[in-house]
Image (cartoon, rainbow, N blue to C red):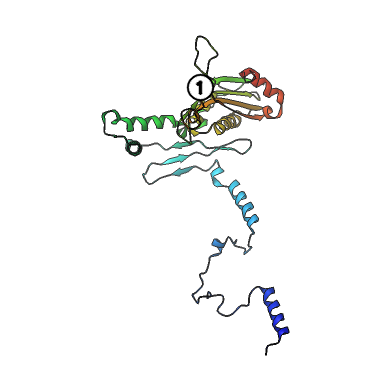
């Protein structure tokens, strides 16, 4: 007859050790089959054998994300998809808060590669036409796939432009330290969620032109003795607007690009636009506009600078 006292002691010991090992327990499962051995890498165990808890793993993943080589502007990446059309990524332009602004550019393509890219896009457009119930072979649609493919390449040409090439070293030491503003920059971009445009808003403020395209983007900065060619500010805006965008990101990308290139005391960008994804579909509110801003440097720190900028661009109306 078993001693109850000894049995309780044994159960306590087993509870303390969580398991009683046997010669076969390491290699065999309960059903007798051989256990599958896992590599340390699949169990997230470092080389030194330290097992990290879930919070530690999360913190480590954040550290790895911060030190990702994609954030290294000295590294040039070339992506070659299956169709053989290469895409080169020049390093990102980093803003003062660590926001990365990637300026991607295609490698030089020969005529054959350009033709392959266009043909692939045309096939996709024909498929879309068929899926909505149209006949791509009818007279009115025969050239639509080619026209649409070329138009889409134009509307997204910002992916193929580098901001530094656009600026082209048009920076001048003038000793000017007062606010510089370029107003009412026309912006045309494509919403990345629905691939429909967003642009300036309609206004009825003038009797002669009852429906005028009003606003777009205002860019202002306060130099630290160095100014940029005035035409370069709309060109920078054009680079980022000619990509699939949302207005919030577009506003920030333009502001951080100017801050990174000119290195002024501060940059202010305000954008006002109407989104056709809200006008011609969805909620269908034709009179709504969206206003976004990004204030950096002295514009972020000093309220009087923000007020001065907003007064000049007419936001306080």
- Residue 312 spot, x, y in % from top left: 63, 17
* Image position of 41 with respect to 84: above or below: below
- Residue 164 spot, x, y in % from top left: 52, 31
- In front: 111, or 55? 55
Q: Would you say residue 11 is visible in this rendering?
A: yes
Q: Most extreme residue toward the right, as rendered? A: 5
- Dot 1 alpha-carbon crowd within 10 angstroms: few under 14, some 14 to 19, many 20 or more: some
Q: Would you say residue 188 is visible in this rendering?
A: no
Q: Most extreme residue toward the top, as rendered? A: 208
Residue at coordinates 60% horizontally, 46% vertically from top-left? 66
Drawn side of residue 223 relative to residue 215, left or right: right
- In front: 300, or 262? 300
Drawn side of residue 136 relative to residue 20, left or right: left
Residue at coordinates 56% horizontally, 62% vertically from top-left? 43
Q: Secondary structure at mark 1?
A: loop
* Image position of 123 with respect to 204: above or below: below
Q: Quadrant of residue 136?
A: top left
Looking at the rendered image, the quarter that the N terminus falls into is bottom right
Q: Most extreme residue toward the bottom, as rendered? A: 1
Looking at the rendered image, the quarter that the C terminus falls into is top right
- Residue 302 spot, x, y in % from top left: 71, 26
- Residue 183 spot, x, y in % from top left: 57, 19
Q: Which residue is label 1 attached to?
A: 186
Residue at coordinates 30% horizontally, 30% vertically from top-left? 141
- Total labels: the figure holds 1
Residue at coordinates 68% horizontally, 88% vertically from top-left? 2
- In front: 128, or 246? 128
């Amino acid at each position: 007859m078993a001693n109850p006292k000894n049995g309780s002691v044994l159960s306590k010991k087993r509870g303390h050790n969580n398991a009683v090992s046997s010669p076969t327990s390491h290699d065999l499962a309960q059903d007798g089959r051989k256990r599958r051995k896992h590599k340390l890498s699949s169990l997230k165990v470092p080389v030194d054998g330290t097992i990290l808890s879930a919070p530690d793993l999360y913190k480590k993943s954040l550290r790895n994300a911060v030190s990702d080589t994609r954030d290294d502007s000295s590294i040039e990446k070339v992506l070659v998809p299956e169709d053989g059309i290469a895409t080169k990524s020049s390093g990102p332009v980093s803003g003062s808060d660590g926001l990365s602004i990637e300026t991607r550019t295609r490698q030089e393509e020969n005529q054959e590669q350009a033709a392959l890219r266009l043909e692939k896009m045309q096939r996709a457009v024909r498929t879309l036409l068929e899926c909505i119930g149209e006949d791509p072979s009818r007279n009115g649609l025969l050239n639509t796939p080619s026209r649409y493919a070329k138009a889409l390449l134009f509307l997204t040409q910002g992916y193929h432009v580098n901001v530094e090439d656009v600026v082209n070293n048009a920076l001048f030491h003038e000793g000017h330290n007062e606010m510089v503003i370029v107003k009412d920059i026309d912006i045309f971009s494509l919403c990345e969620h629905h691939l429909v445009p967003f642009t300036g808003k309609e206004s009825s403020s003038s009797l002669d032109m009852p429906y005028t395209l009003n606003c777009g983007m205002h860019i202002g900065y306060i130099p630290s003795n160095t100014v940029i060619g005035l035409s370069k500010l709309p060109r920078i805006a054009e680079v980022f607007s000619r990509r699939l965008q949302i207005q919030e990101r577009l506003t920030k990308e333009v502001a951080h690009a100017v801050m990174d290139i000119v290195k002024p005391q501060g940059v202010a960008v305000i954008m006002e636009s109407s989104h056709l994804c809200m006008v011609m579909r969805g909620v269908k509110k034709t009179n709504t506009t969206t206003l976004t801003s990004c204030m950096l440097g002295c514009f972020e720190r000093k309220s009087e600078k923000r007020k001065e900028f907003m007064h000049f661009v007419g936001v306080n109306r």
